[in-house]
Amino acid sequence: MRRVKDTRLSCTQLHRWALQWLLDARLLRDHGPACTAVAVWNVLLHAAARLASLLAACRDLSAAPCPQAVFRALQNGLPRTLPVLEGRLNDALLGVSVRRLRRRAWPVAIDWHLVPYYGRPQRSRNEVYCSKPRQGTTRFHAYATACVVPAGRRYTLALTWVRRHETSAVVLRRLWTRLRQLRLRIKLLLLDRFFFGVPVTALLQELRVPFLMPVADRGRKPRKRRRATSGLRWLRRQKAGWYRHTLKRGKQEVKISVCVCYHSYRRRDTGQRRQQKLLFGAWRVRGAPREIHRRYRTRFGIEASYRQARQARIYTCTRDPRVRLVFLAVALLLRNLWVWVHAEVLARGGAPGEAPPLGRLRLRQLLDWVAWAVASLMHDGSTPCVVLDPVG
């Protein structure tokens, strides 16, 4: 066995890496002698690490510009066109070298992330995505991400903003274009139930990408009881195994394979053991039903990326969708930095090919270190206090 070497990691190194990834993406320009790109990114990193707003971050840092100047620098300094902005944000997400990711093929998960929104759109209603009621609203800012799902290598590869009028096939093609630019080999594409349909299936077969996604039952049940069931409802009555199915939408037809499998679980309220039948639509994927179910369960690693990104969320009430997109990208960047530190720094000296232990440095601890490094640069060291106005 290799001898594990003593690896030292400081908060200054973590802050320098995060700041350098943002600066290399060329997202912002200097907005005056005091409100430089370095100062703005430091304020954003401090706000993300402390789960605060820009106003709270500027008040915590005595050498920081005023909140209005920081917000104005964001609005005026970001690229005007959305494709350029998303391209540079994606470059910042993978400030880490992707050479090691190109050495093998990876399973990649794609999912939508809905952030509840309670205000009005800034310019057009297409900025706000409508969905089922959740957390007291039916309007959201929607984002789609692509993430590598094996444990220890869960990098967020691509991020895009989803408008109201865009279909799932349009969003998927945009993410796939980004993945092709990275020159990564995709072993399997794991999709959510929302993507199940003819347009997405036809697109993936055109791109010749193996995929796996849950089957979604759409349409009403037959009213006549004596009428025999067909289609996906007939497949739900079959035993575990593989079946052929044809999806139809108007004159367009696509053929896929449907895997029927069982999932055993225990109810939390009664403790009883239950079985649930699951259907997965696949193309160019083989394996036993139990193996298919186990393989699809790895997709939930992308859900963990959203949960961890909420630990570095900058609070805001702005209606500008570009600024909101930048705030989400900063949270995902800090999470990618956390994964990269374990894989490239803390895992040195381990067994080759071994997954790095992600518990050596907690994400909350990394965020605290980044906030402390920013405070050491932009605070005068005075004791925090509140100045009260005289009464009367």
Image: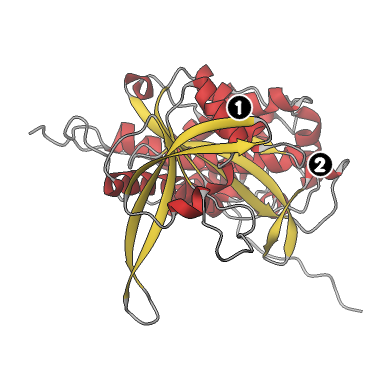
The answer to which image quadrant residue 161 occupies is top right
Q: Which mark is residue 126?
A: 2
| Callout 2 touching callout 1 (CB < 8 Å) | no
Q: Circle 2 — which element?
A: helix
View extreme (left): residue = 1
* Crowding near the residue tagged with mark 1, few <14, some 14–19, many ≥20 C-alpha atoms within 10 Å: some
- The residue shown at (68%, 39%) is 325
Residue type of the residue flagged with mark 1? Arg
Looking at the image, can residue 28 be seen? no
- Foreground mark, 2 or 1, reads 1
Give the residue drawn at x 81%, y 41%.
126
Q: Position of residue 226 (x, y in %)?
A: 55, 64
Label 2 CA crowd tier, 10 Å (few <14, some 14–19, many 20+): some
Looking at the rendered structure, the kind of residue marked 2 is Asn
Instruction: Between residue 212 and residue 84, name the one nearer to us.
Output: 212
Residue 173, numbered circle: 1
Q: Secondary structure at mark 1?
A: helix
Image quarter where the C terminus lies is: bottom right
Evaluate whether residue 82 shows in this view.
Answer: yes
Q: Position of residue 43 (x, y in %)?
A: 65, 43
Left or right: 111 in relation to 133: left
Horizontal and vertical percent position of residue 98 = 42, 22
Earlier in the chain: of badge 2 and badge 1, it is 2
| Residue furthest front in the image | 226
